Amino acid sequence: MEILWLIAIGVIAYLIGSVSSAIIVGRIFGGEDIRTKGSGNAGATNALRTYGKKAAAIVTVCDCLKAVAAILIAMLISNMTGIDSVYGNTPVYVAGVCAVLGHNFPIYFGFHGGKGILVSMVAMLFANWWIGLIVLVFALIVMAVSKYVSLGSILGSVLLVILSLIFGGGDIAYILFCVILAVLAVFMHRANIKRLINGTENKLGSKKG
């Protein structure tokens, strides 16, 4: 029975994560699909480049809130059903990963969404706040210095895995959670990686993809 609750948590988190605020904001601000503009990504960075700071702020807040909602619901279910005594923090990890999957591959929008960095950030902070905070600060520093949002996201993901292996206390579920988030982040940035290598990646503030 416990595994069914874990599956339910994953499904709920995925459905919540599938609510793409960037696509909704794009339709409100521009009357169009943000995925046809700029980088084609349904995320805060593309919203900033396409519609400006106000739109980007709304997307940022909404993406963070949906991650918080998915994880809090997971915590509530695990507490009410008692599966936290069986699985520990695993329900949080499942909710975090599934919320990211929903954001990246939203069922409501043809499975074409964003890159899941904001949702991943919230998930890793819930999973282990101090490791998450270190990764967040590191990623922001990389972004500020290089002006490449993608580079900060990619290197931050790599650091997350390294820190989980060193300081994760041998928690296999937590380490797997971090590895999955990192793999998803790198996979979703594969086009950015090619542009970074070729020197054609657009910097923060650019109006292009």
Image (spheres, grey):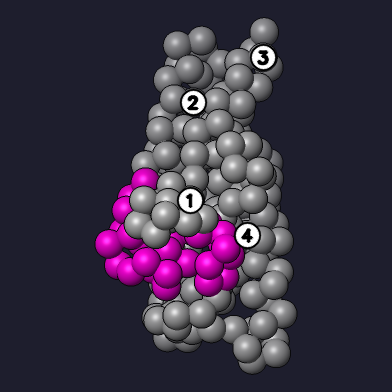
- Whichever of labels 2 and 1 marks the residue nearer the N terminus, that label is 1
Is disc 4 surrounded by few (<14), some (14 to 19) or many (20+) residues within 10 Å? Answer: many
Q: Pointer 4: what residue?
A: 185
Q: Pointer 1: what residue?
A: 23
Is disc 1 surrounded by few (<14), some (14 to 19) or many (20+) residues within 10 Å? Answer: many
The numbered disc on residue 4 is 3
Amino acid type, callout 3: Leu
- SS at badge 4: helix
Q: Pointer 2: what residue?
A: 74
The alpha-carbon separation of the residues under discs 2 and 4 comes to: 22 Å
Circle 2 or circle 1, nearest the eye: 1
For the image, the number of numbered tags is 4
- Whichever of labels 2 and 3 marks the residue nearer the N terminus, that label is 3
157 sits left or right of 184 in the view: left
21 sits left or right of 99 in the view: left
- SS at badge 1: helix
- Whichever of labels 2 and 4 marks the residue nearer the N terminus, that label is 2
Residue 189 x, y percent position in the rendering: 65, 67
The alpha-carbon separation of the residues under discs 2 and 3 comes to: 13 Å
Amino acid type, callout 2: Ala
The alpha-carbon separation of the residues under discs 2 and 1 comes to: 25 Å
Amino acid type, callout 4: Ala
The alpha-carbon separation of the residues under discs 4 and 1 comes to: 20 Å
